[in-house]
Amino acid sequence: KYFSKQEQDIIQKYFIKVLNQIEMTKRIKKPKPSDNKTLTFAVYSYAVGMVTEKEKYKRLALSILNRGLSELRDDGSIVNDSGRAGSAVHYLCSSTIFTLV
């Protein structure tokens, strides 16, 4: 192991605190439809679940990712980000990369 038990506890509490703060923001709490922020949050939530070994964070992530994937257009673009032209390509790529990793 790379960290002592005490260090792991500090890190896990910090990750959970950040996740809870992000989750309460308007764009994450009630996203309609999903966008790059919600998909990136889902990846972070899954990572927190892995670090803390708490399934609830993984389940949250998978529910967000399932919803986000079901909302993709036929061409694979993210509905809520498509109106941003060039930056939409960046958002799609970064969200896709994070989701695949």
Image (cartoon, rainbow, N blue to C red):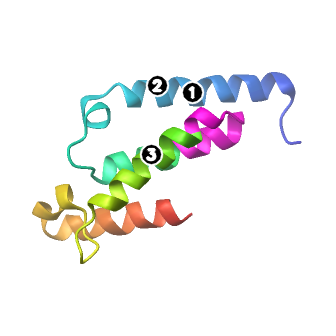
Counting residues from the N terminus, which is met first, the one under dot 3 or under dot 2? 2
| Residue shown at the point (69%, 33%) measured from the top left | 52
Magenta span includes 71: no
Find the magenta span and give its range: 45-57
The residue at the point 78 percent across, 26 percent down is 7
Three-letter amino acid code at the position of disc 1: Ile
Q: In the image, which is nearer the foreground, mark 3 or mark 2?
A: 3
**Which-is-in-front pick, marks 3 and 1?**
3
Residue drawn at 60 percent across, 25 percent down: 14
Query: Which residue is the site of mark 1?
Result: 16
Which is the main secondary structure of the residues drawn in magenta? Answer: helix
> Which residue is the site of mark 2?
20
Q: How many other residues sit within 10 Å of disc 3, few (<14), some (14-19) or many (≥20)?
A: few
Q: Name the residue beneath numbered marker 3.
A: 63
CA gap, disc 3 to disc 1? 18 Å
Q: In the displayed structure, does residue 52 sit left or right of residue 59?
A: right
Number of residue marks: 3
Which circle's residue, 3 or 1, is located before the other in the chain?
1
Residues under labels 3 and 2: Cα distance?
Answer: 16 Å
Residue 1: x and y in percent read 89, 42
